Image (cartoon, helix red, strand yellow):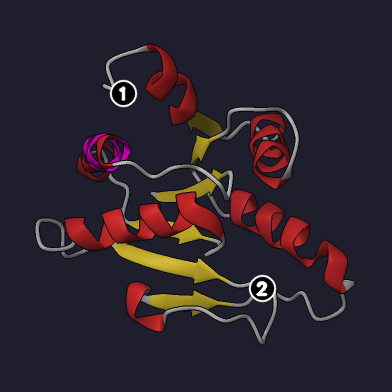
Amino acid sequence: MTVVFCGHRDVVFSVELKENLEIILSDLIKNGADIFLLGGYGNFDIGAVQTIGGLKNKYPNIKAVLVISYLNQKYNRVLYDEIIYPDLESVPKRYAIVKRNRWTVQHADMVVAYVEHSWGGAAKTMEYAQRQGIEVMNIAKIYKKDSFAR
């Protein structure tokens, strides 16, 4: 199963959020998730890839895959098992991230999101996934109202 992450770049990735994301990801892995697609921008993506890295000792079959928007994109290769560049060369630069996000959703079985408001790239990606019939787990809603301690 392939899982895609989308979240606001300015998310405060607290210890509590990391611990609860570990629980969520462990459950997903136990239910077949093994490939995790990330865009590599912002706090949510960085926190998610670090959480995946921490789970690799327990689940060595999982893969963190960076899907880049630009061929010259800077990233920390050590964090990822694989780097993918979708065919975006003919896409105008200002639309490359949007097209990349849609590509990831089209290759996903599920989206794990951290979306608190209805504007921006993360919100648009989450909405696109919902329109495509992809299951979305918005952990910002869970984190704000339920069991996660603040």
Q: Report which quarter residue 49 is drawn in.
A: bottom left
Q: In front: 12, or 30? A: 12
- Residue 108 vertical position relative to residue 145 in the rendered view, above or below: below
Residue found at x 67% / y 55%:
101
62 above or below 125? below
Residue 4's spot in the image, x, y percent?
50, 50
Amino acid type, callout 1:
Arg
Residue at figure coordinates x 44%, y 68% from the top left: 65
Q: Residues within 10 Å of mark 2 (few under 14, many from 20)?
A: some
Instruction: Please identify, in this view, whether the residue under mark 1 or under mark 2 is nearer the observer.
Output: 1
Does the magenta portion include 11? Answer: no
What residue did someone put label 2 on?
A: 86
Q: Nearer the viewer, residue 42 or 24?
A: 42
Left or right of residue 49, residue 6 in this image: right
Left or right of 93: which side holds 46?
Answer: left
Give the position of the C terminus as an image quadrant: top left
**The magenta segment:** 17-25
Q: Are marks 1 and 2 in contact (CB under 8 Å)?
A: no
In the rendered image, which residue does mark 1 sit on? 150
- State the residue at coordinates (47%, 28%): 140
Does the segment drawn in magenta span residue 21?
A: yes
In the rendered view, tell whether residue 41 sits above or below residue 19.
below
Count numbered badges in the picture. 2
Residue 42, horizontal then vertical, whole percent: 54, 57
Residue extending farthest to the bottom is 72
* Mark 1 and mark 2: Cα distance apart in space: 38 Å
Q: Secondary structure at mark 2?
A: loop
